[in-house]
Each structure stands twice: as C-alpha cells, then as structure tokens.
Image (cartoon, rainbow, N blue to C red):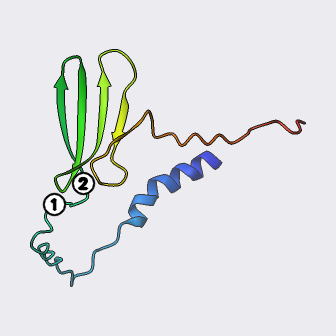
Amino acid sequence: MRKLLLLALLLAAPAIAQKAPPKDLQPLPEPPPPPPGMTEDPLEPQVTIVKRAGETVEEYRVSGKLYMMKVTPAHGRSYYLIDHRGDGTFSRQDSFDSGLRVPQWVLHQF
C-alpha cells in the first residue's frame, strides 16, 4: 500500500510543480562592459617554462616582475627559488610546508 502511494506521489509531482510563467516577464539587460584596463587580472601570474640541460625551470611573474622559480632537475626532487623581499635575491625553499607538526597522541581510548 505504501509503495503504491509513493508511486502515485512521484508520478503526480511534475504535474503539481509546473506553473504557468508570469505574462509580464522582461529579458535582463546586458551587463555594462568592464572599465578600461581591467580586462586582464593583474594578480594572475604569467608562467614561462624554460628547459635547460637536464632541468626544467618554471618562472612566475606578476606585472613582468620575476618573484618565484620552480626548478625540476632531471634526477631528484624539485625545489623553489623565491624572492621574499622583491629585491632580486632568491632563497631556496624545498617545499611550501611550514614544518609545523601538531602532536596527535592517543590520550584515552574506549
């Protein structure tokens, strides 16, 4: 009996849900164009991939200024060279891991 009632409700649901649209609908106006000079995202980095002898270097630039390089050697792990101050001095960083490890000791178990 329950299955029959559920089947009847499922078959009747589309007919109940359909309503006639209002007769005074108007199309939305076109959005205004963006201001001049705002067509590109200024904070999106430009990535240049350079392949050298046995390694690949990805250069990341914002507004033409180089701020980070990812070096992937032919053998070994990749590392990053980052300009933290913006003065052109790059420091090596092996990963973006902060090194913070939260202890996860079991104190009590039921």
Q: Around disc 2, counting alpha carbons within 10 Å, would you say few (fewer than 14), some (14 to 19), or many (20 or more)? A: few
Q: Quadrant of the C terminus?
A: top right
Nearest the viewer among 57 and 22 is: 57
Residue 89: image quadrant is: top left
Name the residue carrying label 1.
40
Position in image of residue 1 (x %, y %): 65, 47
Residue 92: image quadrant is: top left
Label at residue 18 = none
Q: Is residue 78 left or right of residue 28?
A: right
Q: CA distance from mark 2 to mark 1?
A: 8 Å
Badge 2 amino acid: Glu
Query: What residue do we see at 13% from left, 75% from top?
Result: 35
Q: Are marks 2 and 1 in contact (CB under 8 Å)?
A: yes
Q: Outermost residue, left direction?
A: 36
Position in image of residue 96 (x %, y %): 46, 40
Query: What residue do we see at 19% from left, 33% from top?
Result: 49
Position in image of residue 75 (x %, y %): 34, 15
Q: Outermost residue, bottom direction?
A: 24
Name the residue carrying label 2.
44
